[in-house]
Amino acid sequence: DINKIIIHCSATPEGKEVSVDTIRGWHVNGRGWSDIGYHFVVQLDGSINYGRDLDRSGAHTKGHNKGSIGICYIGGVEEKQVDGKWIAKDTRTPEQKEALLDLLKMLKRLHPEATINGHREYAANACPCFDANKEYKLL
């Protein structure tokens, strides 16, 4: 049973496209996971790519993967580093915002009891760089 939909960002620079295969490589080769941790990835142009199969528990939010769906949008930090650090920023394009809203509406129809949350509600970070719970509270 799905009880949470958790939104993430890829923590990659604004405007830089990153493929599902690249993220899969980070997760499989870099972290030793069996697959990409997210179920869906929203590209800069608003296209939605499938990641991990929905019938498999995700690997996106420690302690909250069971019963949740993980969605990642590409972006989440400034285009360039400031003093050698990446600065969190809501970099969603209008196309990403529209695609994310459509995806969330569809998932809520399938799982009406699921809450919509940002990764930052479960971890000490800024991800997804906007308040997902507030933005999607009416869904």
Image (spheres, helix red, strand yellow):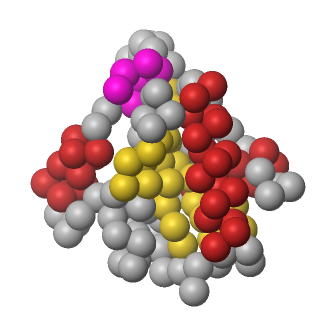
Count of labels shown? 0
Q: Depth check: 44 or 59 in front?
A: 44
**Residue located farthest toward the right when viewing the structure as drawn:** 138
Instruction: Please provide percent x and percent y for residue 63.
Output: 49, 75
Instruction: Please provide percent x and percent y for residue 96.
Output: 56, 34
Instruction: Please provide percent x and percent y for residue 113.
Output: 74, 77
Q: Residue at x 37, y 21 (%)?
A: 16
94 vs 17, left or right, is right
In the rendered image, residue 16 lying in the magenta stretch gets the answer: yes
Quarter holding the C terminus?
bottom right
Q: Residue at x 34, y 57 (%)?
A: 51
Q: Residue at x 39, y 79 (%)?
A: 55
In the image, residue 86 above or below residue 69: above
34 vs 130, left or right, is left
Span shown in magenta: 11-17
**Residue located farthest toward the left when viewing the structure as drawn:** 29
In the image, residue 3 above or below residue 69: below
Q: Is residue 89 visible?
A: no
In the rendered image, residue 139 lying in the magenta stretch gets the answer: no
